[in-house]
Amino acid sequence: AQEGILRRQSSRESAARTYARSLPIVPVRARGLTIEGADGRRYLDCLSGAGSLALGHNHPVVLEAIRSVLDSGAPLHVLDLATPVKDTFTSELFGTLPPGLADSARIQFCGPAGTDAVEAALKLVRTATGREGLLAFSGAYHGMTAGALAVSGQGPSVRVGRLPFPQDHRCPFGVGGPTGAHLAARLAESMLDDPRSGVREPAGVIVEPVQGEGGVLPAPDAWLRRMREITRARSIPLIADEVQTGVGRTGAFWAVEHSGVVPDVMVLSKAIGGSLPLAVIVYREELDAWQPGAHAGTFRGNQLAMAAGTATLRYVRENGLAGRAAVLGERMLDRLRRLAREHDCVGEVRGRGLMIGVELVDPEAAPAGRDGDPGPADTWGDGAGGGASGGAGAPLTPSAPAPLPAAPALAAAVQQECLRRGLIVELGGRHSCVVRLLPPLTITDEQAEAVLDRLSDAIAAVSR
Ligand code: PMP
């Protein structure tokens, strides 16, 4: 049955970026960290619905919440009318928001996907400020709809010619320690000061506290605080895209909490729906410039997703899963850093909480030059996102040794070796050379060890 399904699917479904191509699994059952295929094989799933399964697959509290809506006779589709389910979800969500935002927050339910909420955030700040430009960052990923793509600084495969925001500009993201962070903030500031940049007075700045798809690049706290100072001084709304980093993933309930930064807008999706589609923005009420009807959409009231989301938010909060992610994540990173010392092909190991990236590099090649192909594994500072101006292409860390070139083939081989060993991992980063781990926050110590055992074996197998 499995072979037939895979054959039919791959002949009918587009090859546009899809996990199905690299992960030929036909899942039929799942619980927690484990997925079972139609062929009876079991896998440890560290992709977790691209980070949306904070509690893993089919957690009992999530199933119970969904069942209780189904059994209650409540309508499943009510557009965006007020319901008890929505009221409870909103209260639970507001209870988790950083102080400073929680006091005066507004919520907007968006379409089902993260990219819908990004669109809403961009439109909101443009409406509220009456301005056009947007400052975004190299390596960023905000979604696949046109507006979200325009502020995503990914490689050519996700970019599609001219996009509707004429003034989007990308600044290198602050990687490379305090010096890089400082320089990146200065570059952003100089773009805002440069009359040629087109973003002197942008409608907003959008940032991921940890770039996920970009290759697991945590924004240094000091850099984020500096961005907050710069944007506040200029009355520019700061949008934090916490679609992937939210709900405890990085070791704090929201990743902005690590730096103490309070953004003006937060974009939320993935885990807030407890495995079902849900996306919202929350923002300071002063920004609420929408006219009635300015932002509608049919699927903004998914009752099952709100119930599953409430159960998830509550479970993460009541069980301190953010703190647990911080501790376990650090332990996993320690072991991976030891692994990096044993294998030349493992470049940087980085992450925050249970959002972890292991970069695969080519140890035989000379350090990558700025024109190298594939380029340096861990930077986006060379204008790869396009559109950067005002000196934004300058190297971030002039004194740091050049990183080794990315090894995409090696990373793909590691992914396949992991699969053979019953471990599902995802690839990310500019050259798809970063093996990403996004396990559920409920992963046990023993399961975490099993994941790392399999990953270590897979890396050993390819580095022979
Ligand atoms: N923003 C971030 C930070 C993301 O990681 C993603 C998805 N990976 C999105 C937005 C887009 O979300 P979706 O795929 O649900 O449209």
Image (tube, rainbow, N blue to C red):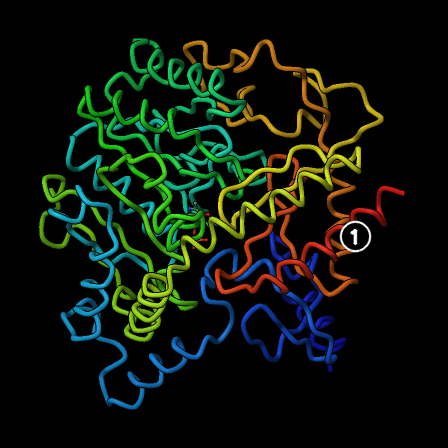
Q: Secondary structure at mark 1?
A: helix
The image quarter in which residue 209 lies: top left
The image quarter in which residue 397 lies: top right
Residue 386 appears at what percent x and percent y?
Answer: 50, 24
Q: Is residue 261 left or right of residue 287?
A: right
Residue 31 appears at what percent x and percent y?
Answer: 55, 76
Residue 68 appears at what percent x and percent y?
Answer: 30, 85
Q: Nearer the viewer, residue 443 or 360?
A: 443
Q: What residue sits right under mark 1 in the picture?
A: 458
The image quarter in which residue 416 lies: bottom right
Q: Is residue 110 left or right of residue 50?
A: left
Name above or below for residue 88 compared with residue 339: below
Q: Residue at x 28, y 83 (%)?
A: 69
Q: Residue at x 15, y 70 (%)?
A: 81
Name above or below for residue 408 compared with residue 292: above
- Amino acid of disc 1: Ala
